[in-house]
Image: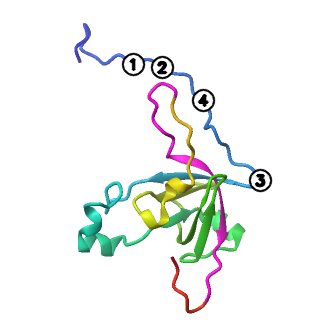
């Protein structure tokens, strides 16, 4: 670092809560992110057969206690809704990796675009959009027998 001490200079900032907190109608915090198999919107990795077989479509991860409370089981199809939009018929993965009150969804898949759910809020300093978290509701999807899920 080009400082007199040779160390980085860090300036603390004041923590601020997320612009949208979970509540009665939207009780979960959605966290979006990457997976090992894909990069961004899969423009390159989506064309790699092995990677596409490993991770062909979006899913939602939920804590076991939350899934049990909602009467959901692993591999159920779920709909995720926020104040801005929804993503329908996504496979549920029940895992202890995600904490209670939180859900995780990868953002790589155009057909199940998690950014339909996220906010238009942005950081006032960096102007970075807040595509990482928002309040959502999760419901069991209405799946008609014999009709493939989206």
Q: Residue at x 39, y 55 (%)?
A: 34
Specify start and end residues of the magenta stretch as a single range: 124-144
Residue under label 4? 16
Q: Secondary structure at mark 2?
A: loop
Side of 70 relative to 91 (left or right): right
For residue 24, which numbered disc appears in the image? 3
Residue under label 1? 10
Q: Position of residue 58 (x, y in %)?
A: 45, 67
Q: Is residue 67 visible?
A: yes
Q: Quadrant of residue 55?
A: bottom left
Q: Quadrant of residue 108?
A: bottom left
Confirm whether the magenta stretch covers residue 100.
no
How far is mark 1 from mark 3, CA to CA? Answer: 38 Å
Q: Position of residue 132 (x, y in %)?
A: 50, 46
How far is mark 4 from mark 3, CA to CA? Answer: 22 Å
**Badge 3 local density, few (<14 within 10 Å), some, or many (20+)?**
few
């Amino acid at each position: 670092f080009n400082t007199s001490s040779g160390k980085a200079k860090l300036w603390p900032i004041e923590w601020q809560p997320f612009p949208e907190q979970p509540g009665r109608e939207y009780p979960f915090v959605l966290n979006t992110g990457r997976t090992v198999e894909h990069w961004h919107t899969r423009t390159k990795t989506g064309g790699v057969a092995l990677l596409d077989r490993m991770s062909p479509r979006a899913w939602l991860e939920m804590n076991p206690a939350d899934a049990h409370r909602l009467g959901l089981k692993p591999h159920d199809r779920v709909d995720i809704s926020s104040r801005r939009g929804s993503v329908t018929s996504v496979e549920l993965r029940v895992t202890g990796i995600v904490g209670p009150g939180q859900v995780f969804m990868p953002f790589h898949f155009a057909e199940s675009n998690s950014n339909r759910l996220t906010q238009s809020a942005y950081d006032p300093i960096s102007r970075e959009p807040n595509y990482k978290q928002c309040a959502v509701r999760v419901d069991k999807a209405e799946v008609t027998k014999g009709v493939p899920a989206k």
